[in-house]
Amino acid sequence: MTVLRQQLTCKGHFLPLKESMSFSSSKRNVLILSFCQVLFNSGRGLTFLAASLVAVNMLGGNLTLVTAPITMMLVGTAASTLPSALLMRRVGRKIGFVIGSVIGAIGGGICMYAIGENNFLLFNFGIFLFGIYSGSAQQYRFAAADSAPVDFKATAVSLVVAAGVVGAFVGPQSTLLTKDLFPAEYMGAFGALMCFTLLSGFVVLGIDIPKLSKQEYEEKGRPLGEIMAQPKFIVALIAAAFGYAVMNLLMTATPVTMKLGLFPTESTASVVQWHVVGMFAPGFITGNLINRYGAPAVILAGTLIFACAVIVALSGQTLAHFWTALFLLGIGWNFSFTGGTVMITEVHTPSERAKVQGTNDLLVFTMMAFSSLFSGTIYHFLGWAWVNYSTIPMIAIMFISVVWLVFRQRAERQIHAAE
C-alpha cells in the first residue's frame, strides 16, 4: 500500500503527493458510507422523535427532564467521539464502525425493555449506548474524505452527509409504523432502531479504506494545541459546534411544544421529517458550493438562514410556523456543519487525523449535549420564545468569526503577493 506523504500548499491545505487509492475505489467507499449514513440517520430521526414522546409519557406533568434522553444520547456521542477515532486509528475504520453498531443495537434492546418496565433511568442508559454508536457514526463523513482525491473531498463529505435525507422519511415513518407493535407504546420503534444499527454494521464491511502505514502510525505529528490554535480550525469548530447547538436547542424542544399544543403525532412527525430533509438534502449541492465559493462563504450563508429560522419560530406556533422554521433550521445546519467539516480536513496530516477529528467531534457534541439539557430547562421555566432567544448569541458569534477569518485570509494573501 502506497504511503501518503504530505505537503503544505500556499493555501494552507495538506495535500497528498501521491494518492494511495483509485478514484473508483473512493466512489465505492462513498456509496457504502452513504448507505450507512442513511441507516444511522433513520435511527437518529426515530430516536429524536420517539425518545421525547416516551419521556413525556413516563414523566407525566413534570417536564424538567423531558429532554434528558436526547441529552444522554448526546453525552454518549460526545464521550465516544475521541475514543472511536483513536480506536479506528489502531484497528481501522471498518472494525471500528462494526463495534459501534453492535453497541448501538444493545442500546436499542435496553430501550425496549425499559419502556416495557416504565423505567426512565434504564431508558436513558439505552439511549446513552445509542449515543456511543452515534459517536462512531460521526466518522462516516471523515472516512469518506480519507480515501478521496483532494478535488473530490468536499463532494465526498457533502454526499455522505446528504444521504441522511432518506432518513428524514424512514426514521419518523418507522416510528409511526412500529410504535404500537407491542402493548407498551413506542417499544416497537426501538426494535426498529436495533435493526437499523445491526444492518449498518453489516453494510460497512464493504468499505476499503487502508489503515495508516507503520510510518504514519508511529509519527506523532504536531501537538494538538498547535493545530487547534490555527484560525481555520477555530472557525471550523465554532461553525460545527454552534451550528449543532442552535439546531439542537430548537429541534429538541419542538416535539414537546407540539405535543403540549395538542398537535397529533403525525403532525409532529411531519415537522421532524422535513427538518431532517432540510438538514441533509442540500448536501447534494453543498460540496459544489464549497468548491466554487469556499467553505467560509457557505458557513456565512448558514448563519443567515439560522437567523431566518428563529424569526419564523418567534412569529407563531401554527403547524406552518413549526414546519418552516425547522426546515430552515436544517438548511442552516447543513451549510455550517459541512463547511466546518471540510475546513477541519484541511488542517491536519494523516498521522494527526484521529486526534484532530476526534477532538473536534468531542467538543462539538459536548456543546450539543449542553444545548439539549438547557433546551428542556429553558422551555420548562421560560417557554418556547426564550428557547429561540437563546440561540441569537451563538448565531452572532458564528457570523463574526467567519467574517474575521475571511478578512484575515485576505490580508495574508495581500502580504504574500507583496513579497
Image: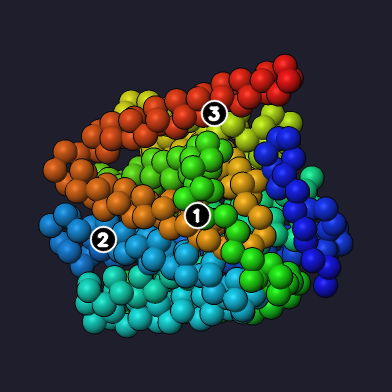
Indicate the position of residue 132 as horizontal and vertical percent values: 43, 70
In the rendered structure, which amino acid carries the disc numbered 1?
Answer: Leu
Which residue shows up at 27% across the image and 38% down it? 387
**Outermost front residue:** 419
Identify the element where label 2 is drawn. Answer: helix
> Which mark is on residue 13?
none
The residue that mark 2 highlights is 68
Q: Nearer the viewer, residue 83 or 8?
A: 8
Mark 2 vs mark 1, CA separation in Å? 32 Å
Residue 414 falls left or right of residue 47: right
Indicate the position of residue 140 as horizontal and vertical percent values: 61, 62
Above or below for 6 versus 310 = below
Quarter that holds the C terminus: top right
Mark 3 vs mark 1, CA separation in Å? 20 Å
Identify the element where label 1 is drawn. Answer: helix
Quarter that holds the N terminus: bottom right
Q: Are marks 2 and 1 in contact (CB under 8 Å)?
A: no
> Which mark is on residue 405?
3
In the rendered structure, which amino acid carries the disc numbered 3?
Answer: Leu
Indicate the position of residue 123 as horizontal and vertical percent values: 29, 74
> Which mark is on residue 224?
1
Above or below for 289 versus 260 = above
Is residue 248 among the parts visible in the rendering?
yes
Q: Give the mark, 3 or 1, whose residue is nearer the N terminus.
A: 1
Q: Give the mark, 2 or 1, whose residue is nearer the N terminus.
A: 2
